């Protein structure tokens, strides 16, 4: 699958955590992805938006909430490509927009927002599409969060990138799970390129019962495209670190984030990567892991760290 041009993200050892847990702790730094503010969504969009270079498209339509990293990355890339982005922007609490750096950046990038509540999203998308079709507007629509074949394949391909960087054995990998697109791609990629590794998906939004449906959908996208029979036999799904739901961060998680920043110099945010990193640290502290090679995939989200700065008592 073709994609826009981007640089390989660094693979680093987190020396503080290697010593703390008596393991080799590696980190794939997609927070340092070199396009559109970085992160997993910026990587996915290199694949999602590639066809728009060859298509005469006036508008890119998608949907998302105020804190969405996907919205910000899409907005910046569309600005670079000269494409108007229209965003069905939803929330039940208008104050969510006030402190969101991602929302602020979408405005700077010239996004046209179409506001609605969460229950009105489907209706608003359908209405917006109907209006564009009636007015003969050339557009492409993508489901919010990058949920698509291209999004899943981006992280299948990212594991291929990791394989070029690291030829040794990886015992376990930890990654945040929101829409499930990143996690699905990584699970399938690990089966192909690191077949003995276990993948820990740390949920930031849903319990397993609710997440399984979207994971299975993404798996079907990739299996059909590659004519493979990948599954989730290497996945350990964790929903015990939700702490009440999406965007909820208790003191113990914030403490882990502060430790990561002050001891390792790596930024993680309370909504996504920090929640996954906290989950990893809790799991590693409870089990004997001596001598193992563990990898944390930093999917970014630092904009949300700045947006939630008032939660940290300095």
Image (cartoon, helix red, strand yellow):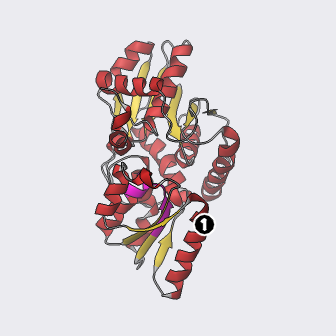
Q: Is residue 30 left or right of residue 219?
A: left
Query: Which residue reaches farthest bottom?
Result: 135
**Residue 51 appears in the picture as rendered:** yes
Residue plotted at (41% across, 71% down): 52
Crowd rating for badge 1 (residues with CA inside 10 Å; few <14, some 14–19, many 20+): few
**Residue 68 appears in the picture as rendered:** no
Up-down: is 265 above or below 97? Answer: above
Locate residue 15: give its quadrant: top left
Magenta span contains residue 92: no
The x and y percentages for residue 143 are: 54, 62
The x and y percentages for residue 265 are: 29, 28
Up-down: is 268 above or below 150? Answer: above
The x and y percentages for residue 107 are: 33, 62
The magenta stretch is: 61-73
Judge by depth and name the residue closer to the eye, 201 or 199.
201
Give the labeled residue for mark 1: 122
Q: Is residue 311 left or right of residue 171?
A: left
Up-down: is 106 above or below 68? Answer: below
Magenta span contains residue 67: yes
């Amino acid at each position: 699958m073709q994609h826009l041009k981007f640089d390989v993200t660094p693979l680093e050892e987190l020396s503080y955590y290697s010593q703390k847990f008596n393991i080799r702790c590696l980190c794939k730094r997609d927070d340092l992805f070199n396009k559109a503010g970085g992160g997993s969504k910026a990587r996915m969009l290199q694949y999602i938006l590639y066809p728009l270079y060859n298509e005469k498209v006036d508008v890119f339509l998608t949907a998302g909430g105020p804190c969405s990293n996907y919205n910000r990355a899409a907005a910046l890339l569309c600005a670079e490509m000269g494409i108007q982005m229209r965003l069905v922007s939803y929330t039940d609490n208008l104050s969510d927009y006030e402190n969101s750096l991602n929302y602020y950046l979408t405005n700077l990038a010239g996004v046209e927002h179409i506001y609605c509540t969460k229950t009105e999203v489907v209706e608003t998308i359908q209405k917006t599409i109907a209006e564009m079709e009636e007015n003969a507007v050339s557009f492409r629509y993508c489901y919010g969060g990058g949920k698509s074949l291209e999004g899943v394949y981006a992280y299948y391909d990212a594991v291929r990138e990791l394989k070029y960087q690291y030829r040794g054995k990886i015992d376990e990998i930890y990654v945040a799970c929101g829409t499930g697109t990143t996690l699905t791609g990584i699970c399938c990629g690990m089966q192909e390129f690191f077949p003995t590794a276990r993948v820990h998906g740390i949920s930031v939004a849903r319990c397993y019962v609710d997440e399984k449906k979207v994971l299975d959908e993404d798996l079907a996208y990739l299996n059909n495209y590659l004519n493979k029979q990948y599954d989730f036999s290497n996945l350990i799904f964790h929903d015990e670190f939700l702490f009440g739901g999406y965007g909820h961060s208790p003191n113990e998680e914030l403490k882990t984030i502060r430790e990561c920043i002050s001891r390792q110099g790596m930024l993680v945010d309370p909504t996504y990567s920090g929640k996954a990193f906290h989950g990893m640290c809790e799991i590693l502290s409870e089990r004997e892991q001596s001598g193992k090679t563990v990898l944390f995939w930093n999917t970014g989200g630092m904009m949300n760290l700045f947006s939630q700065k008032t939660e940290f008592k300095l």
